[in-house]
Amino acid sequence: MATHHEVLQASRAGVFLPRPVSTTGFWSWVTTVDHKRIGIMYFFTSILFFLVGGIEALIIRTQLFAPDLKIVSADTFNQLFTMHGTTMVFLAVMPLSAAFFNYLLPLMLGARDVAFPRLNAFSYWMYLFGGIFINTGWFVNAAPAVGWFGYANLTSTTYTPGLATDYWTLGLQILGIGTLVSGFNFIVTILNMRAPGMSLMKMPVFLWTTLVTSFLIIFSFPSVTVGLILVTFDRLFNTNFFEVAANGDVVLWQHLFWIFGHPEVYILILPAMGIVSEILPTFARKPLFGYSVMVLSTMLIGFLGFGVWSHHMFTVGLGPVVNSIFSLATMAIAIPTGVKIFNWVSTLWGGSIRFKTPLIFALGFIFQFMIGGLSGVMHSSAPSNAQQQDTYFVVAHFHYVLIGGALFALFAGIYYWFPKVTGRLMNEKLGVINFILMFIGFNVTFFPMHFLGLMGMPRRIYTYDAALGLQFWNQVSTVGAFILAAGVTVFLVNFVISLARGEKAAADPWDARTLEWMTSNPPPVYNFAVTPVVSARDEFWARKYEGVAAKESAAALEEAKKHGIHIPGNSYFPIIMAAGITVFCYGLLYSGALAIAGLAVTILSFFGWAFEGVGGTIIYPEGDAR
Amino acid sequence: MHSPNGSAQAKHVSPTTYLKVGAVLALLTALEVAVVYVDALKGILAFLLLSIGIIKFALVAMYFMHLKFDSPIYYRFFVGGLIMATALALAVLAITQSNRVAEALLRG
Amino acid sequence: MNHTAVEHTATGMPNRKLGMWLFLASECMFFGALIATYLVYQGQSLVGPYPEDLFDIPLTTVSTFVLLMSSLAMVLAVSASQRRDMKATRLWLAVTAAMGLIFLGFQAYEYNHFIHAGLTLSVNLFGSTFYVLTGFHGAHVLIGVTWLVALLVHTLRPLDWERRALDIEIAGLYWHFVDVVWIVIFTVVYLLGVGG
């Protein structure tokens, strides 16, 4: 479908720099503000970091294959598990979810882009540069080694001198700013840019989970931001926040971190739950069971998630009253979570099921997330927790919810929306092999860790004595890890092959339910020539099968073709500002002059951004544009 | 309220009202400071100061930030954040304090 | 091509205004965590100087008063912009920014006095918590002043009044929030620190 572009005369004018206007080529990606391109960039970057984190995991598992191995030193091992955790949480799973948010939000809402397109681009560049910053440590023999949760006062200069911990604290701040900003962006987008007729209770559940996730982000990240500031000031400016000699309290760090950290795990799982809630109805050809209850459960999980943080601190010695309160609150959270599982199963029950790869991964999610949830409930009892804390039982729990849960759901989403983004279907046979290898590999790796934990194997140890009887399950686990890696490899192969010569997909290959499937593959840059008018939940399905008429007027389409559609202009400032902040952080570690330079670039780019004006392009849809 | 623009509010607050609120804020500040120096009120000082502080906070939020006259959604988000921050701060304080008391008792 | 100055939205709330309120809700958590840190460590310093040695309540009352009145100036600026009164808008924006700078001047004077009296970031817990809490607040004021000056400069360029009034209103929300945080700090740190 041909379109022609007309660049607004005013849009070439910029501040400090001329406004970029090209639509193809390298610079058009660097300066893009198009949510679909940003989503694609999030996707590829997150897969890259996922592989980095995966290799770190394989080295860990190899080192633990047998007692007293010396494949890596204890110090290196500390760096490996710290970076593995940090990478997987902040550089792989969260950004992979962000890829889906970015690509799908406007399409599912019937909108043309997010509320703040340049801020959206800025979030991506902060992610990329933050990821590079935090991994810089590897190259200067200073990779962070304090665990992904950096407990004080291990993070003080007394116990971790050198730059490693600073790479961690400052890197997380860079990443945190990017994430916070997208939180604001997505809330405003969802509330303000819904298509006419799309009330909140008619939104796809994925949009609800995105909304609640975004609220979790904006309320939880400030807590860890402050905690990291305190650690940074202790390290750089000799303050006493966690200086025991000055009566500082290291437990304060744990409070500040986990007040963030617990909502963070819901930030990691809610998007995945949203994806599954979209996939199951499509492949069961039935609406989601108990929509209102799902929405309410999502909100409850978000809200209660702020009231349970001390369950990560049951063994700190906070006392029986505190422990009991948080124990009860944690058990309570299992209720809305369990409700969701029943609703998903009920969605499938009595449906006309098609076993395609997206559904198969979604089924894996339900089963494995449930197991992870059960071990979580086991943790919630403070006495049991006393045995499980800091053992491999915890490692088993969170990998079940994070890989078995979040990752499997994200893979389901990749297989599901791949045709929308690329116009081709991923290969079904390879998809099933991918799933089988990942399913077997994942469970063989992590189920034995429940046993290892109950047998008393502590976390974060780089080796273990042969007399402890831990070898057998460690070996099983390591073998599983390589099977899992094989499964991921099959995924990558499938991805590349399908991209190159996968079967071409129609606009709606799965016979789906929501608005994004109404567009072409991939959608035109303006998403919808005419904003859809909505009157039902699952509007697209209702139009196909329930006799709901399309309500967009022919006149509106003629109007769009005649006067064109305005697309927000590209801009240099998101990437420049992100670079300025990152350079400032390097400067804090290496050179005052560099820090000042970074700060200056940040401030100047802020003004450039604020004053650069509307900019943009007009696009004229032609032919069979919808 | 579904007006296409948000800056011209449904209700315009006159500059006189703002000046009155400003005057009250100034008076309350003077009162706060005076109370600190009155020995007789020492017992309820914290209560008085916190109350006056809350009133000042509310006046600025409701009038200067226009929450009283704007969409209730702004109010809910802001107050939600406020309540959450206050509750969490108090919880951390309470947990920390109770631990200090317990430790002091243990040391005898 | 027509571009309405303030976009139409599903809720009727302008995007940037809704975004600013969400930001302020988030900042409640940010300052809440800093204030909680201050309160957790209040009275825990092993060595002096201590708050009661240093706080000058009359002086801080003046600076608090200045910041409060700057909020008044800010709403007068917003009001003027809604009436499309360019002169008054410029006047009140300038007055607000100036009062913000005066507040920062008082802050700088206070810091100087405290440092000479021996209170540094590293001497005890009071120093660490006091300077970080009030320092981040001061940084927020500085950003606010810069924002106001930028708005002032921007009045020299042509802009749709509806859009300009919204810009100033949003800056006002930020400014009032910074003022409100100071109300909390003044009460909790200064007044209760000396009296309580």
Image (cartoon, coloured by chain):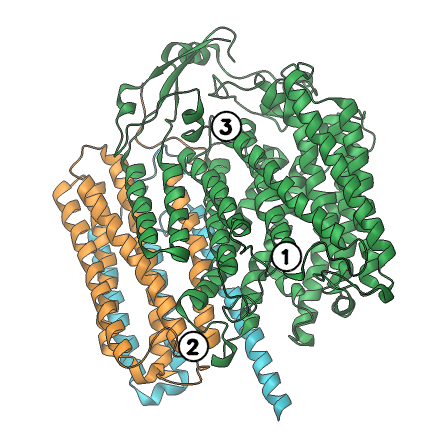
In the image, what residue type sits under mark 2?
Answer: Leu
A93 shown above or below A241: above
Q: Residue at x 52, y 78 (%)?
A: A244
The image quarter in which residue B91 lies: bottom right
Q: Nearer the viewer, mark 2 or mark 1?
A: 1
Chain identity of mark 1: A
Q: Nearer the viewer, residue A332 or A447?
A: A447
Q: Position of residue A183 (x, y in %)?
A: 49, 44
Q: Which residue is mark 3?
A: A37
SS assignment at label 2: helix
**For the residue carrying disc 3, how many other residues have a C-alpha within 10 Å: few (<14), some (14-19), or many (20+)?**
some
Q: Residue at x 61, y 85 (%)?
A: B103
SS assignment at label 1: helix
Residue A76: assigned label:
1
Q: Which chain is green?
A: A
Q: Residue at x 30, y 76 (%)?
A: B32
Q: Which chain is cyan?
A: B
Between the C-alphas of marks 2 and 3, the distance is 48 Å
Q: Which residue is mark 2?
A: C125
Between the C-alphas of marks 1 and 3, the distance is 37 Å
Q: Which chain is orange?
A: C
The image quarter in which residue A316 lies: bottom right
**For the residue carrying disc 1, how many other residues have a C-alpha within 10 Å: few (<14), some (14-19), or many (20+)?**
some
In the image, what residue type sits under mark 3?
Answer: Arg
A289 shown above or below A585: above
